[in-house]
Amino acid sequence: MRDVSRLAGVSQMTVSRVLADPDLVSEATRLRVMKAIEQLGYVPDRVAGSLSSRRTNFVTAILPTLTNSNFADTAQGLAEALRPADYQLLIGYTMYKLAEEERIIRAMLSRRPDAIVVAGMVHTKPASEMLLRAGIPIVEIWDVPDKPIDHAVGFSNFEVGRAAARHLLSLGHRRIGAIGSRTDGEAIDLRGESRLAGFASVLREAGIGDELIVREGTAPVSHDHGAQTISILLERAPDVEAVFAVSDISAFGALMECHRRGIKVPADLSLMGFGDFDIARQCVPAITTIRVDAAQIGRLTGEMLVRLFNEEGGAADLQPSTIDVGFTLVPRQTTAPAVLEAGLS
């Protein structure tokens, strides 16, 4: 900063004002200082500045993965909403492991973020305690917990599953299954499991068993997972009429396996997924799915945080504490009404 002040011909205090509150400095002085900063390649020490301001100007986002385009869209929406307020995004990913989430939370808190955004509402006990005691805004995303740690922006994965089951039932299907990943390993897709739980609840309400819900493999799901898991389902119930996959990714794998087996979709079997991924829109036939605006989740979270940061102390309650973005069922070509057996009405 001393070098910048000498080159620009101003005091160090003026350089500090240009960086912290440029509106207090004349345009000519600001441009002279910024030119000196550019010439010297000076990078302000945000950590040193945070010792007095108690702000680090970065937000931590903890996501299951970045290979899933929906989570990537959420991160982008969050970053875009934070950028005008000069907040940067620091991302950690858990690989669907609660123990890894706990480790990341501990590591990130040691770097003093101004807020933490975390996907999901289920955490280890130590992780929950750290978040509760953090003294900064915490936003749980991609779900709507009954009792959020602080704030939440998302939708009900349980209701997504219920909507999927109701759709397949409305088409007249009765031999209905679903495919997801196992829940007895280290990596668990808790949101996918919540969808399956909602799906099963509607089947039971309709007097249909949930024994055709197959959980196989570990999170995250893949095209291979969809192919392998629907193979297990078809071996167990060759007469299955309709299948819900917890993700379009596994739904696409299941669709390809049906093609290989000569099973016509939707004439022989209706299939639907979740997420409205590009591949679901572009494959043939296009996959019936449930759409969530992933980027909107990020934008709304960022806007919520900026408002919180502008409140006195940065931790005031913001109402409502939970924002439900909802979801939309998108019927496409992989689902169709059940075909009645000849002679039946």
Image (cartoon, rainbow, N blue to C red):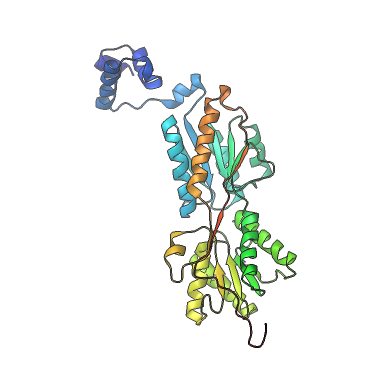
Residue occupying the point 57% across, 43% down? 118
Of residues 307 and 225, the one drawn nearer to the viewer in this rendering: 307
Which of the 4 image quadrants contains residue 148? top right
The location of residue 14, given as percent across then percent down, is 34, 14
Q: Nearer the viewer, residue 326 or 104?
A: 326
Q: Position of residue 34 (x, y in %)?
A: 29, 23
The reply, left or right, for residue 341 in relation to residue 282 is right
Q: Quadrant of residue 135?
A: top right
Q: Quadrant of residue 239?
A: bottom right
Count of marks overlaid on the render: 0
**x then y, percent, for residue 214:** 64, 69
Residue 141 visible to the viewer: yes
Which residue ends up furthest to the top in the rendered image?
11
Task: Say whether residue 111 is visible.
Answer: no
- Looking at the image, the residue that sits furthest to the bottom is 343
| Quadrant of the drawing holding the N terminus | top left
Q: Which percent across, then down, holds residue 78?
A: 47, 41
Q: Is residue 137 above or below residue 33?
A: below
Decide: is 306 above or below 76: above
